[in-house]
Amino acid sequence: MLDAIQTATSAERNAVPASLDALVIGTGVAGLYELHQLREMGLKVHACDTASDVGGTWYWNRYPGAKFDSEAYIYQYLFDEKLYAGWTWSERFPGQPEIERWMHYIADTLDLRRDISFSTKITKATFNENTGRWTVETDQGDVIDTQFLIGCTGMLSAPLTDRFPGQSSFKGQIVHTGRYPKGGLDLEGKRVAVIGTGATGIQVIQTIAPVVDKLTVFVRTPQYVLPMKNPKYGPDEAHWYKGRFDELKTNIPHTFTGFEYDFQHTWAELSPAERRAILEEIHADGSLKLWLASFAEMFFDEAVSEEISEFVREKMRARLKDPRLIDILVPKKGDYGFGTHRVPLETQYLEAYLRDNVEAVSVRDNPITEVVPEGVKLADGTVYEVDTIIMAVGFDAGSGALARIDITGRDDLKLAEEWRKDIRTTLGLMKYGFPNLFMTGAPLAPSAALCNMTTCLQQQTEWIARCIGDMRASGNDLIEPTEAGEEEWVRHHDETANATLIAKTNSWYTGSNVPGKPRRVLSYTGGVGTYRAKCDAVAEEGYPMFAMSKVAAPQTA
């Protein structure tokens, strides 16, 4: 059941051309826009996707309650006002079905499907040092020769499906939220276990609690949560946000996190009463604003972090009331600070635990040891018998999706092996040793966290398109980061990240959720606007962190 997604047959898919200028892997937010840009530039470009349709994360993540937690009108492409205005959202934070329809609207309006092969998984890519081109293979038997290979594989798209021994022995249904069946699951009247209480698990729990007979939630790490306010949108609201296109296009790319709001207050300049008033006002907004636009000092100053963390804990305790639930579900002082992990938005999530049919089970000191035929077994031998297990246990973030493809660069370098040694990139856009391999949503860019994803993915795909255009204009065939250039970026990234409290916590932000993964803050923490400016400067200065060259003519006897 873990991979129970309906896919098209190979006979229905578009054929992949044998020779290309550029091959794009993935047709989510980044892949669709990259395909569009390169096609507009006149390149022979094609995209492949394992899924049977476009959407990326919004194709795969169709679990109950999946929805935006970025406001719909900013989770948008901002390169074309007509495209922006042509779609109308029904509410502030729409659900997955509506988002998926929007992705179809983008693909159809831009006429992208004719250059996409669905149900086609890229399995292998090998750089040919003699030709300066990539040979790419798919699970459908395609062999493609391409100059550029562009990974738009997503930052949270490599699900950790095999987390516990014995999963295959379970007699009921077991699914990972990132591979939820297209037709859904019939949960009514069932005994259901949810493992994991991150942003995804929270959406599932609050949605299915009223439906199932018995819901058992296994909680390892308590989460700070913020309440979501999700008003419906009518003609007036649509007119309001569509009229802001120029404003949003101008401002959003330069804010700290790629949202419309930004940090405006300085902690030290305010009295305790003024700070509290600001926190109350922003908390009442019902968005991620408390995390992304209250006080930046929470990411650097432990005293500020603790005061804001206690503010959020106080709000959560007031809703739960029950001391046992508070102990299991509310982070404790000293655990980690608010905002150093992914902050979920929720709707009556805490109240779900006050229902008679919902039980929270702490597995912090009594961990899950295995899945048995009857259900979930803990270290003390307790077995929770269930009919369905929903695993909201996360992803191998940032590096995982590309590392699951057999990618070989020059000198037989394997991308997966390189990232098993150390998570390194140049600008989060390329990797030393892998010429003409571009990537979006990759480590060391503002992507896996602290960024409105459409803002960052648009910027990264635009930079890639510009770079390819500059190469072609200069008559060069190859581009690769220099070793010194990569070291310069890694050093800057680490200096920036290590100044934050994020680097001191254990979470998927630092890769600590994947055993053996090298520890490094996966996302650039210097700010979306700063990152954009640095990338633009590199291009304008002639790509000093990279080496461009022509492919040498073959030697004749």
Image (spheres, rainbow, N blue to C red):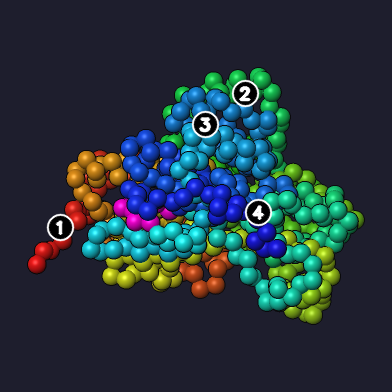
Q: Residue drawn 81% across and 54% down?
A: 186
**Within 10 angstroms of label 4, few (less than 14), some, or many (20 or more) residues?**
few
Q: CA distance from mark 4 to mark 1?
A: 47 Å
* Residue type at tag 3: Thr
In the picture shown, does residue 518 fall above or below 6? below
Residue 531 x %, y %: 38, 45
Q: Which residue is mark 1?
A: 553
* Residue type at tag 1: Ala
Give the image quarter of residue 185: bottom right
Q: Which residue is mark 4?
A: 6
Q: Earlier in the sequence, mark 4 or mark 3?
A: 4
Q: Nearer the viewer, mark 4 or mark 2?
A: 4
Q: Which residue is mark 2?
A: 238
Could you tell me if the residues under marks 3 and 2 are in contact, i.e. CB atoms within 8 Å?
no
Could you tell me if the residues under marks 4 and 2 are in contact, i.e. CB atoms within 8 Å?
no
Q: Which residue is mark 3?
A: 109
Q: Which residues are magenta?
A: 144-152
